[in-house]
Amino acid sequence: MQQIPSLITMMQELIASESVSSTRSGWDQSNRSVIDKLESWLSTAGFSCEVLDVPGEPGKANLIATLGSGPGGLVLSGHTDTVPYDQGRWNTDPFKLKEQDQRLYGLGTCDMKGFFALAIEAAKDFLDRPLQQPLIILATADEETSMSGARALAELGRPKARYAVIGEPTEMRPIYMHKGMMMERVRVQGRAGHSSNPALGNSALDAMHEVMSELLAFRREMQQRYQNDAFEVAVPTMNLGCIHGGDNPNRICGQCELDFDLRPLPGMDIHELRGQISQRLKNVADRCQIELETEALFGGIPAFENNAESPLVQMAERLTGHSAQTVAFGTEGPFLQQLGMDTIVMGPGSIDQAHQPDEYLDLKQVKPTIAVLQQLIAKCCL
């Protein structure tokens, strides 16, 4: 009978399976090589596996692998994609696992292919034991860009379980709440003309100045209205990230674009925020007599909030010895929560190493992570 590979071999093969997701087509890749590898290993282990193509995303798929059956159980969830890598800035090959100085280097070691290897290693102890509730290993597509994989699962209504742990890098500290994220674009279309006579045109840059003033006023109002001291930055943030417009000093600017991000707190609805921004900027356009349109650069990530006293939060606190915390980065947590699961974010590695050249997972976290996952499986599934 075919055997599941060793932990290090699994990590080597996962890291070697390129699965970059990016909004730029030149970088974007399929995640099927990772999905197929996980499906092969988990099928060998006795899991019932289902590969689900993501609608509208050719080459992208999710995997639901289930051991046992029943109405409750535990989901161990991760995403199969990575961010692009900085060519020339890595000291190692990003697609070859390298062990050095008690660290495992490679693209995705902590964010977050390494979690799959640790989850499968933890599951090995339960393959021949009768589970009272199912253990589900969930692998998703495109978390780093559109979250299309998790969105598709939420629309499908699967998987179903009582508990869900998303293994993002938190140094095995349970996370019960995080901010949301929106990335938006404002495009102003003016009328170019000779700069010697302002009447010959209508400056898109002048109008964008009004747009930026309105957005910053909206930011001040949000921060006065919404605060949550559980976060290190207790208010919603808005960052005006990049601006492009015009082509020459002696021409009235005919077109200008601004991209910004907004990170709402729990309780702030993304759709309502977009509506408020659109209305405020429409007023600017009317005032400046200029064409203006807004665009969401991706669907957005809702803020995530679990009850700090939930059974899973308390269980994770007892097993790790860490109090539940909050983070500012976004995860697939809101989408799994929509499926009715008691959800936390908790995995090995540090977010400080994610999205960086020479990404690594500290070997000191490997055995403790496996031990905590095994205890979670025992409590939730046996």
Image (cartoon, rainbow, N blue to C red):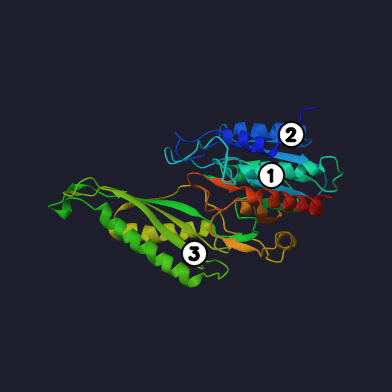
Amino acid at dot 3: Pro
Badge 2: residue crowd in 10 Å (few <14, some 14–19, many ≥20): some
Q: Nearer the viewer, mark 2 or mark 3?
A: 2
Q: CA distance from mark 1 to mark 2?
A: 13 Å
For the point 38% across and 64% down, the residue is: 216
Q: How many marks?
A: 3
Q: Is residue 184 in view?
A: yes
Q: For residue 4, which numbered disc appears in the image?
A: 2
Q: CA distance from mark 1 to mark 3?
A: 35 Å
Q: Nearer the viewer, residue 217 or 347?
A: 347
What residue is disc 1 on?
118
Question: Dot 2 lies on which element?
Answer: loop
Query: Residue 130's spot in the image, x, y percent?
Result: 87, 44
What residue is disc 3 on?
236
Residue 9 lies, with reference to residue 265, above or below; the image says: above
Judged left or right of residue 87, residue 31 is right
Lower sequence index among marks 1 and 3: 1
Callout 2–callout 3 Cβ contact below 8 Å: no
Amino acid at dot 1: Leu
